[in-house]
Amino acid sequence: MRVDLHGMYQADAKELLLNWLDHVPAGVTELRVIHGSNQGTVLRDMIWEDLAHKKIKTRLHTLNPGETRLLLKK
């Protein structure tokens, strides 16, 4: 699954991700988060440094600097 955060404020993006993680469908083990990179790193930094949720197993970089993969616990 994929979530696109382009153009969102940090607080709104965090709220959206936490809400999504609270209601993740059964069987989903990965979330691709599109945060962008050309307009700064605020959203990426929030995902890597501030976002905490019991369902997040790990975070992975991709070849796209504007994307982070969240691997989820089953």
Image (cartoon, helix red, strand yellow):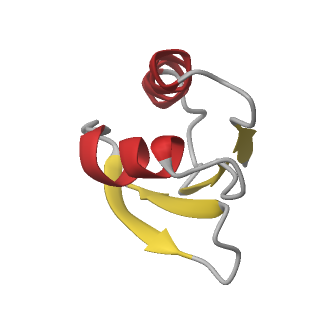
In this rendering, position of residue 61 left or right of residue 65: left
Question: Residue 20: which quarter of the image?
Answer: top right
Q: What residue is rendered at 49% in x and 51% in y?
A: 44
Seen from this angle, which residue lies furthest front? 39
Q: What residue is rendered at 55% in x and 25% in y?
A: 13
x and y, in percent, of residue 19 in the image: 49, 18
Indicate whether 22 appears above or below 26.
above
x and y, in percent, of residue 29 in the image: 53, 57
Query: Which of 6/61 is in front?
Result: 6
> Does any portion of residue 74 appear in the rendered image?
no
Query: Which of 25/19 is in front?
Result: 19
Q: What residue is rendered at 28% in x and 36% in y?
A: 53
Query: Which of 50/27 is in front?
Result: 50
Q: What residue is rendered at 27% in x and 50% in y?
A: 49
In this rendering, position of residue 49 left or right of residue 70: left
Question: Residue 24: which quarter of the image?
Answer: top right
> Does any portion of residue 5 appear in the rendered image?
yes
x and y, in percent, of residue 22 in the image: 43, 22
